[in-house]
Amino acid sequence: MLPEEKVMAFKTEKITGCLLLLDNLRKLTVIAPTINPYIEEIEEMGLQILPEIGTHIDSLILNIKSLKTELCELKKNIKATMQIHDSIKYKEEYDKLIEQEKELVESIARRERFKIIFRTCKERIQKYFIAT
């Protein structure tokens, strides 16, 4: 996973969490009206991050699709290599292909998890603004 995706996921989760706390924070405005600008700033962050989340989801979808295509091709190579397993050279090649397959599967799974995080946060942010 790229560092920028990790940063974006972190940022998205924190802003989403802040938005979920705003209802309780609003109750405190009776006692401390000076917090209103902070509430507005958090809401603005939520609105600003929505398009970014959408962009990251779209990027992840394309990336996952590409990785799945690559995995499919790799599996074809593995199958072809398995049929020519009569020498040590092919055994080494086969082992490398299996390792690549494992890495691709893990990479796809990581990206799928990030996609779920982004979608969940996007839905929560949208629900917040619909409710307010």
Image (spheres, grey):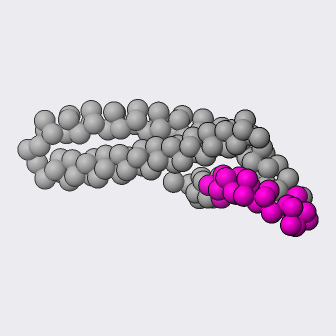
Secondary structure character of the magenta stretch overall: helix
- When asked about the image quadrant of residue 68, the answer is top left
Foreground residue among 23 and 49: 23
Q: Where is residue 96 in the image (x, y as percent from the top left)?
A: 27, 52
Residue located 11% across and 43% down the image = 85
Residue 37 part of the magenta segment? no
Residue located 34% across and 33% down the image = 73
Look at the image and tell me in which quarter the C terminus lies.
top right
Foreground residue among 4 and 39: 39
Q: Position of residue 23 (x, y in %)?
A: 73, 53
- Is 51 displayed left or right of 34 in the figure? left
Residue 19 part of the magenta segment? yes
- Is 105 displayed left or right of 57 in the figure? left
Residue located 53% across and 35% down the image = 61
- Is 34 displayed left or right of 76 in the figure? right
Query: Would residue 122 be visible to someone looking at this image?
Result: no
Foreground residue among 68 and 100: 68
- Is 107 displayed left or right of 116 in the figure? left
Q: Where is residue 53 in the image (x, y as percent from the top left)?
A: 66, 43
Extreme-front residue of the structure: 30
- When asked about the image quadrant of residue 129, the answer is top right
Bounds of the magenta segment: 13-36
Query: Would residue 57 be visible to someone looking at this image?
Result: yes
The relative height of residue 22 versus residue 69 in the rendered view (above or below) is below
Q: Position of residue 26 (x, y in %)?
A: 80, 56
Extreme-left residue of the structure: 86
